[in-house]
Image (cartoon, rainbow, N blue to C red):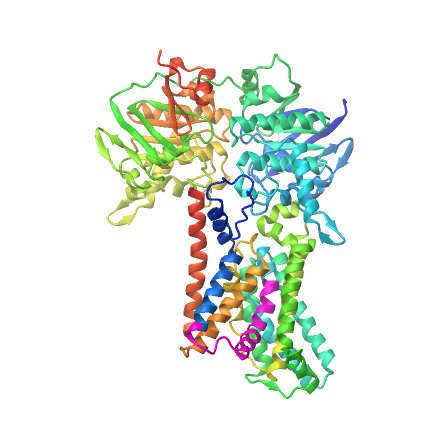
């Protein structure tokens, strides 16, 4: 099977002020898992949109199985056999799984909807995809994100999609769900489906890819078959155009006195009996699987979730934090993993966003001084090298990495002592990732502390002074940076407490 | 938003299965609303002997017929996320058009046909405005709501039209097997509404469109056509209700259908249709309308000031939707 599934010929797409894709040409072989990597802004999303018929291209030609195609709408692309699972899932969340599988093509009998056939065939489709644990009658919004994604993929399989595009499919999945997804990808491959896989996680690329394409700043850098010789470092070099330090400065900041003491903290079943100390100048990582209580621990510390037991001391003094307002008064900052939903004000400009958590600072003589707001924003834009067109740019239009920097600026403007941060680099490209970690290190070197939750073990190992591992709301281990090994973290995250040795 | 389908019977634990099942049933808006209605009726029948009378039921049902007929297509439209505020005005305007035609001496079937056709077109216009100009359904139908009412006022010249031919009046006054014909129209529309929403692919698509418009388009559902047609159906049924109302009352007044749209939107929300679309049922909508009407009926029977009706309806809306939001929050936290 050496046919070409998709051939791109000098595709160019220009947006006002940006050349999103410039003369991009490459081929994707039928039945391959073809990974596309590149930093944010490299043109991956634009390329997906062109392939999916969401946008047209200004120049160039797409060929699908040897025939030139011009998609005017997503429907056209779908009819031609291209299916897309977007990062932000786009299913019918009020409806049940079966209805989602048969959207737009509900089985009918003599003009009436045949519910029996609907549920029966849905069951068969799910079983065929190995998704026996998903109930065809369950409402979509009662399923986990991973399961919802599987249902979307199953729907594409049912529609006989010949090319399936997966855009950052694993960014919100648990380890188990990722494995399930990979199984499904292998199944699809066996059926001859061509898969275009976009991911920031290079480990996944190494595991899955048959071929690899690298984009950078809208230009095509390379397309090559994936071989054992290609390492992660090589890929990063291709993407960034330079070597990126996978070393985020652990040990460069001075670990000082105890800043925060948490004793037997609990919140219902989600967080139970967590104790730790946090020192000035320290980044404490929290590892664990999705649902292990990592995020819930941060929420409890920040008063977003009710504390049902235990105590928190800051600077040696016991504090009672019952809501985010209390938390902010005690100089805590919380940067959630869902920066778009919970954190940023997407429709407001950069200046307003950066000022949002520290509005009282810009008041002088009872009136708001807009000059001070602008001044502060400029300071952070420069310090964090936020790429933007100016203070008045809407945050909505920034790339993921820059959005994260804006959010960080917002909270640092409030001058917190402890920064709680959840998945600091989710959806952020490799280059910006290093920058964000170095920024966090810079924050703690000024006598502050950071608690960082992350699903990515390499990230934790490269950036944290200590890592606490959680499982089902409990702490199953605390490791120093020198003791960190991926296998050890995984063992603890699966619930095995190491005997103190 | 409120119809929480819990179909996890297989996995539910054995202990406390019954109470859990009852809990699930109560979360279904149709069932909790039906229970509420029965309790309400019980209280009323104790409070006044006039409630449990055939005559009262006839008044109650006939009174709700107009609202109910329009509520059914409104419900289907709203499930798809398309709110329609123009129903009451469309009723008045198209009723007036038909009445004018009758007074011009046109034959009854032709006058009715003209009324229904204008209802179809003016209703469909809502959909066209939404599709072509990109207005939100709320803004578009607020506009036509006001414009249609104004047009009716112009046509009626501030007065009422009457002296219709007997062959027209009978359409609103006849009885079949002792049941007023308006009640029969209403029942037919309710039953048809329930059936098409469940079994007709075209109408069932309302759930897809309301749940996720973009994905529905992607799934090959013709969202624009659906929008125009459902608005046109609401317009047609509003015209029909207006014509029948003229026939029953023997006159066409400029106040016909006044604030019907608000009553119906409240009834739909109380009946469990979500303002954002994707959730709801005709049965729930029907029970919502019944509740609204029973409040009015109770106030008449108990000789209370009629102005309280609106206060009570407002409170019911806030309580019903508020309770819903609270239950959902509790569920999300659990």
Q: Main secondary structure of the magenta part?
A: helix
Q: Quadrant of the C terminus of chain B?
A: top left
In-front residue for pair A381/A311: A311
Residue under the point 23% across and 48% down: A365
In the picture, residue A168 is in which quadrant? top right
In-front residue for pair A470/B43: B43
Counting from the top left corner in percent of width and height, residue A311 is at 27, 32
Residue A432 appears in the picture as rendered:
yes
- Quick one: which residue is furthest to the bottom in this view? B163
Counting from the top left corner in percent of width and height, residue A345 is at 43, 43
- Quick one: which residue is furthest to the left in this view? A317
A98 shown above or below A280: below
Residue B212 on the magenta span: no
In the picture, residue B122 is in which quadrant? bottom right
Counting from the top left corner in percent of width and height, residue A21 is at 62, 32
The span shown in magenta is: B46-74
B73 shown above or below A209: below
Counting from the top left corner in percent of width and height, residue A458 is at 47, 20
B204 shown above or below B286: above
A30 shown above or below A330: above
Residue under the point 49% across and 34% down: A400
Q: Is A118 positioned to the left or the right of A39 in the image? A: right
Q: Is A83 positioned to the left or the right of A171 in the image? A: right
Q: Is B289 positioned to the left or the right of A333 in the image? A: right
Residue A26 appears in the picture as rendered:
no
How many discs appear? Answer: 0
Residue under the point 40% across and 41% down: A353
């Amino acid at each position: 099977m050496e046919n070409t599934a998709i051939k791109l010929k000098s595709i160019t797409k220009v947006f006002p002020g940006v050349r999103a894709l410039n003369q991009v040409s490459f081929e994707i072989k039928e039945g391959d898992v073809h990974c596309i990597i590149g930093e944010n802004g490299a043109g991956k999303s634009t390329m997906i949109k062109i392939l999916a018929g969401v946008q047209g291209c200004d120049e160039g030609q797409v060929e699908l199985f040897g025939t030139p195609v011009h998609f005017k709408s997503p429907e056209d692309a779908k009819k031609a056999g291209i299916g897309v699972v977007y990062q932000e899932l786009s299913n019918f969340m009020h409806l049940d799984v079966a209805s989602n599988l048969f959207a737009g093509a509900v089985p009918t009998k003599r003009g009436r909807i045949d519910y029996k056939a609907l549920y029966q065939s849905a069951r068969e489709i799910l079983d065929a995809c190995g998704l026996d644990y998903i109930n065809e009658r369950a409402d979509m919004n009662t399923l986990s994100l991973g399961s919802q994604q599987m249902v979307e993929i199953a729907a594409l399989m049912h529609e006989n999609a010949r090319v399936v595009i997966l855009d950052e499919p694993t960014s919100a999945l648990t380890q188990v769900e990722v494995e399930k997804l990979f199984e499904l990808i292998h199944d699809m491959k066996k059926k001859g489906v061509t898969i275009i896989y976009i991911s920031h996680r290079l480990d996944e690329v190494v595991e899955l890819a048959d071929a690899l394409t690298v984009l950078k700043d809208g230009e095509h850098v390379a397309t090559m078959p994936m071989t054992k010789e290609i390492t992660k470092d090589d890929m990063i070099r291709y993407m960034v155009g330079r070597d990126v330090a996978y070393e985020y400065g652990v040990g460069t900041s001075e670990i000082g006195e105890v800043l925060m003491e948490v004793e037997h903290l609990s919140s219902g079943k989600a967080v139970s009996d967590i104790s730790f100390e946090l020192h000035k100048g320290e980044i404490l990582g929290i590892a664990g699987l999705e649902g292990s209580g990592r995020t819930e621990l941060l929420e409890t510390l920040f008063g977003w979730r009710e504390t049902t037991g235990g105590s928190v001391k800051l600077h040696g003094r016991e504090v009672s934090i019952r809501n985010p307002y209390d938390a902010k008064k005690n100089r805590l900052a919380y940067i959630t993993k869902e920066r778009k939903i919970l954190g940023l004000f997407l429709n407001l400009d950069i200046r307003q966003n950066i000022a949002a958590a520290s509005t009282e600072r810009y008041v002088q003589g009872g009136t708001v001084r807009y000059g001070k707001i602008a001044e502060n924003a400029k300071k952070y834009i420069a310090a964090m090298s936020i790429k933007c067109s100016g203070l008045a740019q809407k945050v909505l239009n920034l790339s993921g990495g820059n959005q994260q920097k804006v959010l960080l600026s917002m909270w640092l403007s409030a001058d917190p002592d402890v920064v709680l941060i959840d998945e600091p680099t989710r959806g952020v490209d490799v280059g910006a990732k290093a920058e964000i970690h170095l920024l966090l290190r810079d924050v703690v070197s000024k006598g502050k502390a950071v608690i960082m939750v992350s699903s990515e073990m390499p990230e934790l190992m490269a950036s944290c002074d200590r890592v606490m591992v959680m499982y089902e709301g409990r702490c199953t281990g605390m490791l120093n940076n020198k003791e960190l090994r991926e296998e050890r973290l995984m063992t603890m995250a699966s619930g095995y407490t190491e005997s103190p040795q | 938003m409120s119809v929480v389908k819990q179909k996890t019977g297989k996995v539910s634990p054995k202990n406390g299965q019954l109470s859990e099942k009852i809990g699930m049933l109560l979360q279904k808006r149709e069932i909790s609303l039906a229970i509420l209605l029965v309790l309400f009726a019980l209280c009323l029948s104790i409070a006044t002997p006039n409630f449990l009378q055939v005559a009262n039921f006839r008044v109650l049902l006939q009174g709700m017929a107009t609202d109910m007929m329009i509520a059914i297509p409104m419900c289907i439209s709203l499930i798809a996320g398309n709110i329609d505020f123009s129903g009451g005005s469309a009723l008045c305007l198209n009723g007036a058009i038909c009445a004018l035609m009758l007074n011009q001496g046109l034959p009854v079937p032709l006058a009715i046909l003209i009324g229904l056709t204008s209802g179809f077109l003016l209703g469909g216009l809502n959909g066209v405005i939404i599709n072509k100009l990109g207005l939100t359904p709320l803004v578009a139908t607020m506009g036509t709501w006001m414009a249609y009412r104004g047009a009716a006022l112009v046509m009626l010249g501030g007065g009422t039209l009457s002296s219709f031919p007997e062959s027209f009046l009978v359409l609103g006054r006849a009885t079949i097997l002792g049941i007023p014909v308006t009640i029969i129209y209403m029942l037919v529309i309710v039953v048809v509404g329930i059936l098409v929403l469940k079994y007709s692919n075209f109408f069932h698509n309302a759930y897809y469109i309301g749940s996720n418009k973009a994905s529905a388009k992607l799934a090959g559902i013709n969202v624009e056509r659906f929008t125009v047609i459902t608005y046109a159906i609401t317009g047609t049924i509003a015209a029909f209700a207006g014509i029948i109302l003229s026939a029953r009352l023997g006159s066409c007044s400029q106040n016909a259908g006044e604030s019907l749209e608000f009553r119906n939107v409240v009834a739909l929300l109380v009946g469990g249709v979500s303002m954002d679309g994707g959730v709801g049922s005709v049965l729930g909508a029907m029970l919502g309308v019944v509740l609204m009407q029973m409040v009015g009926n109770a106030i008449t029977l108990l000789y209370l000031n009629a102005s309280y009706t609106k206060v009570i309806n407002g409170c019911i809306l806030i309580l019903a939707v508020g309770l819903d939001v609270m239950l959902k929050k509790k569920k999300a936290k659990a």
